Amino acid sequence: MTKNSSNSKNPLHGLWALTNRDLKKWYKNPIILMLGIVQPIIWMSLLGKAMNLGSMFTNFSPTLPPNIPQEQIAQVMSELSKQAMTQIFGTADYFSYMAVGMMSFVVMFTAMFSGMSMVFDRRLGFLNKVLSTPVARGSILMAKILSAVIRALVQATIVLGIAYVLGLSVAANFTILNLLGVYAALFLISLGLSSIFILIAIRSTKQETQMAVVNLLNLPLMFASNALFPTSLMPEWLQMITKINPVTYATDATRQLILYTVDMHQLAIDFLFLGAFAVVFSTIGIVLSWRYLSK
């Protein structure tokens, strides 16, 4: 058996070389990295800080008998604000609630645009050259997915650090194990979403098609989840959609690990959903790459 034929049967042959090629185009162009994190920073800085929901209670002055001291009223309203925010958002600080959701936001958008690389490789002729080598077609697809996952995790780390500087309140029982769990949840959702959008681009030669898909799905994935608002307060028909939205499960898992006291039962459900989501769509991607990835 020749060396080339043995390499062609190795599913990992060429995987890191192709992954590193995509990563080089990213980290050697810092503008792309900056553009990837500027948007969530703007959301956190403007929307997260502007929507100071707790002030609705503390700045509200009810009409009460004049013999009640204003200091007592202010104290009662402040306590009411904390109770209401904690009951609705799980934390008295909406910025912290939203900032954790922005991590899923970053991962989602990085995964969405991962398919563009496949489109450009086909248009520029690089994909044809790779298909002429002994590299397994599954490795070509997984290299795109792996590079998207790495980019998403790096950008989410930067956003988490900036959120902490801006005032993110972490739970008192937050440990390094919690942080590893956060990365595990983000890894799984990034793996699944990247597989979907790269699959969409596997036969495409037009970036307009990929952009149309991104523009169609970005808002439903974001707003039909708990990234910005609790799903329990949404209409019932919308709650049904959030239950099949992977962004909901990733955001819930990261919030539990960063902000809340961990509910092991719910956390297990989140990871089971994310794990099944990642395994199913990455497997479908590898299988279909052998059938549809062609010159």
Image: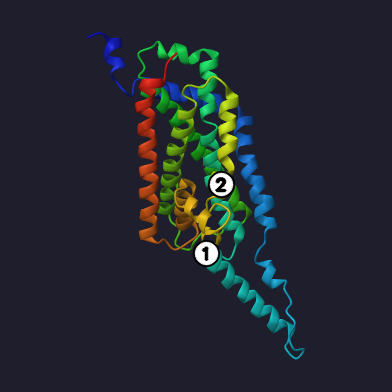
Q: Residue at x 45, y 11 (%)?
A: 129
- Residue 214 at x, y = what percent? 57, 35
Does residue 189 appear to the left or right of 276 in the view shown?
right
Scheme of colours in the image? rainbow
Looking at numbered disc 1 in the image, what kind of residue is underneath it? Answer: Gly
Does residue 149 appear to the left or right of 70 in the view shown?
left
Residue that label 1 marks:
90
Q: Which residue is drawn at 72% across and 73% down?
A: 60
- Whichever of callouts 1 and 2 sits on the residue coming sooner in the sequence is 1
Res. 75 in view: yes
**Can you name the residue that lies furthest to the bottom here?**
67
Does residue 70 appear to the left or right of 272 in the view shown?
right
**Can you name the residue that lies furthest to the left here?**
1
**Can you name the residue that lies furthest to the top here?**
2
Q: Residue at x 41, y 14 (%)?
A: 131
Label 1 Cα crowd, 10 Å radius (few <14 / some 14-19 / many 20+): some
Nearest the eye: 158 or 248: 248
Q: Is residue 59 above or below residue 137?
A: below
- Residue 151 at x, y = what percent? 51, 34
Q: Quadrant of the C terminus?
A: top left
Q: Is mark 1 on a helix, strand or loop?
A: loop
**Can you name the residue that lies furthest to the front here?**
237
Residue that label 2 marks:
222
- Residue 210 at x, y = what percent? 56, 28
Label 2 Cα crowd, 10 Å radius (few <14 / some 14-19 / many 20+): many
Q: Is residue 16 above or below residue 177?
A: above
Q: In this view, does 190 lie above or below 205?
A: below
State which quadrant residue 65 falls in: bottom right
Q: Is mark 2 on a helix, strand or loop?
A: helix
Residue depth check, mark 1 versus mark 2: number of the one nearer the observer: 2
